[in-house]
Image (spheres, rainbow, N blue to C red):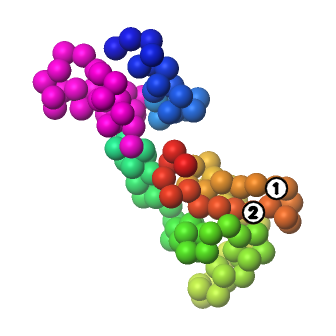
Amino acid sequence: MDAPHLDHLADAAAGNARDAITFLRQAAQEAEWDSADTITEEHIRTAIPAARDTLRQRSLDKLTDDQRLLYDILLESGALMPKDIYERYTGRVTSPKSKRTVRKYLSKLEQYNLIRSEGEGPSRRYTPRRSRGE
């Protein structure tokens, strides 16, 4: 594998070393499946989406029921402000968590690269990512 291949992996990982390692591992597996001696650009191109799906699923598997519900609300609704997320969340659970806890959960979802936020304070909006690279 040469420098341009490594650059492609690094760009796709956007500075996240764990993602880069996962992409490289998947590319190596793709090369092995092809009985290739080296990792090609095609292996990398194929590996990145497959590895992103794996990473996304791992992140989803780590979520608590409440965190998953918040993510599902965003998937269903698109971009929402925290107050709207909380309102929809409390309408679906019998024992809702506090607003502060929900904000922590949203931060965790963002850390897992499942959602992204724009803006500050009460005008902040959260948007779901449909895939890790989005």
Q: Are marks 1 and 2 in contact (CB under 8 Å)?
A: yes
Outermost residue on the left side: it is 35
Q: Who is closer to the viewer here, 102 or 24?
A: 24
Residue 92 is situated, as x and y percent measured from the top left of the image, at 59, 85
Within 10 Å of disc 2 (Cα), the crowding (few <14, some 14-19, many 20+) is some
- Please state the extent of the stretch shown in magenta in the rendering: 21-49
Q: Is residue 100 visible?
A: yes
Q: For the residue labelled by badge 1, is the local secondary structure a helix, a strand or a loop?
A: loop
Q: Quadrant of residue 97?
A: bottom right
Which residue position holds label 2?
A: 125
Residue bearing the label numbered 1? 119
Task: State left or right for residue 65 relative to residue 100.
Answer: left
Q: Position of residue 12 (x, y in %)?
A: 50, 33
Count of residue discs: 2
Assign the N terminus to one quadrant of the image: top left
Q: Earlier in the sequence, mark 1 or mark 2?
A: 1
Is residue 22 on the magenta stretch? yes
